Amino acid sequence: MLHDTIAAVATPPGEGGIGIIRISGPAAVDIAGGLFRPAADRDWRSGPGYRLYYGHVVDPETGDTVDEVLLSLMRAPRSYTREDVVEINGHGGIVPLRRILQLVLDSGARLAEPGEFTRRAFLNGRLDLVQAEAILDVIRARTGDSLKVALGQLRGALSERIGTLRDALLQVLAEIEAGIDFPEEEDVPETLLENLVGRLAAAEDGCAALLTGADAGRVYREGLGVAIVGKPNVGKSSLLNALLRESRAIVTEVPGTTRDVIEETVNVRGLPLRLLDTAGLRETEDAVERVGVARTRAVIGEADLVLVVLDAAAGLREEDREVLALAGGKPSVVLINKIDLAPDGIEVAQVRALTGDRDGGDAADHPVLRVSIREGRGLDELEETIAGLVFGGQITGSQAVFISNVRHKTALERARRHLREARTALTGGLPLEMAVIDIRNALDAFGEITGVTVADDLLERIFADFCIGK
Ligand SMILES: Nc1nc2c(ncn2[C@@H]2O[C@H](COP(=O)(O)OP(=O)(O)OP(=O)(O)O)[C@@H](O)[C@H]2O)c(=O)[nH]1
Ligand SMILES: [Mg+2]
C-alpha cells in the first residue's frame, strides 16, 4: 500500500481564499509535473524543495488552464509523510479544486482514505501513535488549554514518559531472564529480588502518576458534558446564555420556552464544556410528567456534570425534588437562582437536606450556590466550582504531561495491573517465568499506546476518525 501515490483535497469543503490538494508518494512529483506549467519555465522538479513555485495547472489533454496556483514540493524524507509530497495551492473554490484533484487521480494517484497521510507518517516512523492521535486533537481543540495538551503530546512529551517506563521495564526483564539461568531457583539472590521488586513498584507509580490527570485530560480532549436541568422558567436558558456570553437560547417569562435540547460548547477557565440546555421538567395535574422525567433522566445519564437550577422566587417544589433525585447519582452543582427577587426564597440547608450532604460541610458532593443569573451574581463562583470539580484539586493547567485519550488510559491501567501482578509473583516466591509473562504483558500495553505493538484493526479505527486529506 505504501508503494502507491495518494491524493486528496486537504482544505475543508466549501469556498475559501485558497484550497490545497495534497499528493504523497513515489509518483507525486511526476504526476504534478504532468499538470503544472511553471511561469518562466522554471525547472521546479530539480530545484530545491520548500519553495513555492508559481504557475498554472493545465489539463494535459485539452491544454485548458484549470487554475492559477502555487506549488510546493517537500522531498522525502523531510515531509509530513516522509514520502515525496507535492501541495498544489489553488483558489479555494469547489469546481477548480475538484478538477485539479480529478486530473491528479487520472494521472495515476489514488484518492486517499481518511487519515491516510498521517497513517503513512506513522508507518514511516515520523510520528508514533500518540503523536498521530494528537494531530487530530490539535485540529479539534476547543480551547487554548485543549490545544496546549494536544501540542504537548504532539511534541512527544507523553511518548517520552511512556518510553522511559518501557525502557526501565525492558531492563528489569533482561535481568530476570538472566536470573532464570540460576541453577536452582532458590539461588536467586535476595538482594537482586528486592531490587527488581522496587523497580517494578517504581514503574507502577509512574503509571499511577500519569493516570492521576487522566480524567481532567479527557475533559480537555472531549469536553465536559454538562446538563442544565430544572423545572420550567427557573433560568436554565439564561444560564446557558450567561456562560456562553451571548444570547443563544430563547429566554422568556413563559414557562416551557425551551422545547428541545440545545447544545453549545463554551470555554470555562480553559475547559471546554459541552452545555446541554433542556426543556423544563414540569408537573401535570399532581404527577410529574412521565415523558419529561424520562427525557431529563436520559440527558442526566449522558452528562459528566449536572447543573440543577432552582427558582428562589418560586420556592422548593415537587418538580425540584424530582430533579434533585434524578441528578443525585451524578456530580452536580445546585444553583438557587433569582436571589435578586427572593434572597431567602430557598435556604441552602433545605437543599442540602434533599441531596443528603451535611450542611456546612466543605467537601459536599453537590455544592449549592446562590446566584442571580440575570444580574450575573455568583457566576464566577460557579465557574470556579466547575473547574475545581474537574481538577479535583490535584492538578494544574501547567502540568506538562496529560493523558487525555481513553485508549491511552485503559492501556496504562492494564500495564499497571500487570506490573502489580509481576511484583506479587516475585514477592510470593512464584517461578520467575510467571513474573516474566506479566512484565511482557505490561510492555505490550505500553507499546500499544505509542504504537510499537499495535493491531491493524486498532490502527484502522484510529485513523478512520480523521478527515480526508489529513
Ligand atoms: N429576576 C430574575 N429573573 C431571572 C433570573 N434568571 C432568569 N430570569 C428570568 O426568568 C425567566 C425564565 O428564564 P429562562 O432562562 O427562559 O428559563 P428556563 O428555565 O430556560 O425556562 P424553560 O425553557 O421554559 O424551561 C425569564 O424571564 C428570565 O429573564 C434571575 O436571576 N433573576
Ligand atoms: Mg429554557
Image: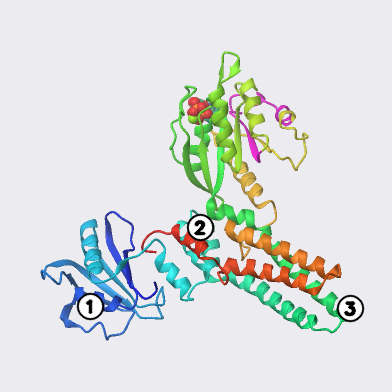
User: Where 333 sits versus 81, above or below?
Assistant: above
Secondary structure at badge 3 equals helix
Q: Is residue 245 left or right of residue 453?
A: left
Q: Are marks 1 and 3 in contact (CB under 8 Å)?
A: no
The residue stretch that appears in magenta: 330-352
* Residue 213 in picture, x, y percent from top left: 65, 58
Secondary structure at badge 1 equals helix
Residue carrying label 1: 33
Nearer the camera: disc 2 or disc 1: 1
* Residue 414 in picture, x, y percent from top left: 68, 61
Whether ligand 2 has any atom under 8 Å from the Cβ at mark 1 is answered as no
Residue in the picture at 39% in, 58% down: 467
Q: Quadrant of residue 92?
A: bottom left
Residue carrying label 2: 144
Residue in the picture at 72% in, 64% down: 418
- In the image, what residue type sits under mark 2? Gly
Residue in the picture at 48% in, 56% down: 141
- In the image, what residue type sits under mark 1? Gly
Kindly give the residue lying farthest to the top in the view shown: 285
Kindly give the residue lying farthest to the bottom in the view shown: 46
The alpha-carbon separation of the residues under discs 2 and 3 comes to: 57 Å
The alpha-carbon separation of the residues under discs 1 and 3 comes to: 71 Å
Q: Earlier in the sequence, mark 1 or mark 3?
A: 1
Asked if the stretch drawn in magenta spans residue 348, the answer is yes
Residue carrying label 3: 186
